[in-house]
Image (spheres, rainbow, N blue to C red):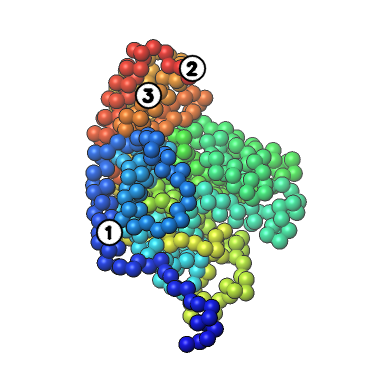
Amino acid sequence: MDIARETVGIMAEETLDPADWADVQALSRRVVDDAVDYLRDVRDRPVWREMPVDVRAFFAASLPRAPAPLADVYGEVSRTVMSYPMGNIHPRFWSWYMGSSNFTGALGDFLAAIQGSNLGGGNHAAGLMDSQVVNWCKEMLGFPASASGTLVSGGSMANIIGLTVARNVKAGIDVREHGVAAIEKPLRFYGSDQIHSCHRKAMEALGLGNLALRRIPTDAGLRIDISALRAAIGEDRAAGLTPACVIGNAGTVNTGAIDNLRALAKLAHEEGMWFHVDGCIGALIAIAPQNAHRVAGIEWADSIALDPHKWLHAPFEVGCALVRDAAAHRRSFAVTPEYLESTPRGLASGEWLHDYGLQTSRGFRALKVWMALKEHGVEKFGRLIDQNIAQASYLAGLIEAEPSLELAAAPTINIVCFRYQPGLAGEALKALNTEIMLRLQEQGIAALSDTTVHGEHWLRVAITNHRTRRDDVDLLVREVVRLGREITAQGPVSS
């Protein structure tokens, strides 16, 4: 024995692998069985429920120092995290705008974690699958095969990717080298007054500032006013600014309004501007046979942001940014340090996917999308989109038929804004409908959100859920009316 090693002593080498794989295998079978039960019985549980005090206190526990049996750890997860979810996989979750996940996608996430690849790039199967899913997204939206793309965390980051390329192409200088302060004429980006808040964050992150994003008025259907847009571009050009990018909405988050994408593409081309489409709400309507016409013109965009974790129902998180000019896309992000240089053969001979975004380390997001598309086929996902849009239309009809309910406007796609109306106005009406929304959540009946449309408060139902059925929509209307009458009978609601 080596004397030095004997003198110093050798600590036992450790690993995170289990000492007994058989025990882990048995527990894993139980976890999978519980997961199947969890999804199978989801409609029998409340959509959402408040956590009791002891569960909240559990999350304030201090850092664990000593080990615990894995079965006990899973028991704690089951009692707390699994028992008090956000609720978005439930068929009556219609708050905000979210997908409802799917079991095959969850298996994909599990396998991706087991396989453990870093999708920064390299010559390995996960990297090829990542590129394949991007190619499938291009095909779904009618983008050319020569276009570029990257999988990201979600829609906000997908929009930032597209807008970064737009800024760099239209700046007139090498922004990466000299920075935005060297831009001679300040850039202007344009979107409707219904544009998502992530675009403000993008302007801030890109160093342009919120004032660089000019909000254009909308028409009665909350679509961007093309004439007002054209006038704003002219004003800014005359003032010595550089109109750089038009952002079109393929579905707004408030009401699902879809801008005239063909007209925006034409205007952007005439003005020498970049045309970016925020398609996180509705880009994938392009695969829906009955409704694809609503997003006609999306294929003419210079860049598109979309969210497979919405209408492809992939487990969170996965977004996708597509860019028509692949070279411009790569130029906006590529950096090649000496430790990431390509080799003619071996592991480093594959494409470096981090050259198309901000992350060097990237998770294997593609597998959950790939597996679900392979299992069901893209045509089924298209039919599910049509189904959700039909359910929204059905809900609108029920609201119009119920005297105590008021519809904000006929839905464009799958978002319905309405309210209970017993003859109130202003803050009293808002307080009443807010209370209805909160009781629906607290009683586990349904999860709605609320918003402002044309300056007035409305309840909002966004049906982006493959588990929703028409009888869920029937139940919603009955319960809103019941709660509205109940709350009204109790007297005024304090706001």
Disc 3 crowd, CA 10 A, few/some/many (<14, 14-19, 20+): many
Q: Is residue 481 above or below residue 34?
A: above
Taking the spot 32% from the left edge, 24% from the top edge, the residue there is: 480
Q: State the CA–CA distance, disc 3 to disc 2.
A: 16 Å
Q: State the CA–CA distance, disc 3 to disc 1.
A: 42 Å
Return the residue at label 3. 436
Q: Earlier in the sequence, mark 3 or mark 2?
A: 2
Q: Earlier in the sequence, mark 3 or mark 1?
A: 1
Callouts 2 and 1 close, C-beta under 8 Å? no
Q: Earlier in the sequence, mark 2 or mark 1?
A: 1
Q: Is residue 42 left or right of residue 151?
A: left
Name the amino acid type tagged 1. Leu
Name the amino acid type tagged 3. Ile
Disc 1 crowd, CA 10 A, few/some/many (<14, 14-19, 20+): some
Q: Nearer the viewer, residue 90 or 75?
A: 75
Q: State the CA–CA distance, disc 2 to disc 1.
A: 56 Å
Q: Nearer the viewer, mark 3 or mark 2?
A: 3
Query: Residue 414: x and y, percent?
Result: 37, 38
Q: Nearer the viewer, residue 289 or 335?
A: 335
Query: Residue 217: x and y, percent?
Result: 57, 33
Return the residue at label 1. 27
> Can residue 382 be spotted in the picture?
no
Return the residue at label 2. 426
Q: Is residue 383 above or below residue 421?
A: below
Name the amino acid type tagged 2. Gly
Taking the spot 30% from the left edge, 53% from the top edge, the residue there is: 103
Q: Secondary structure at mark 1?
A: helix
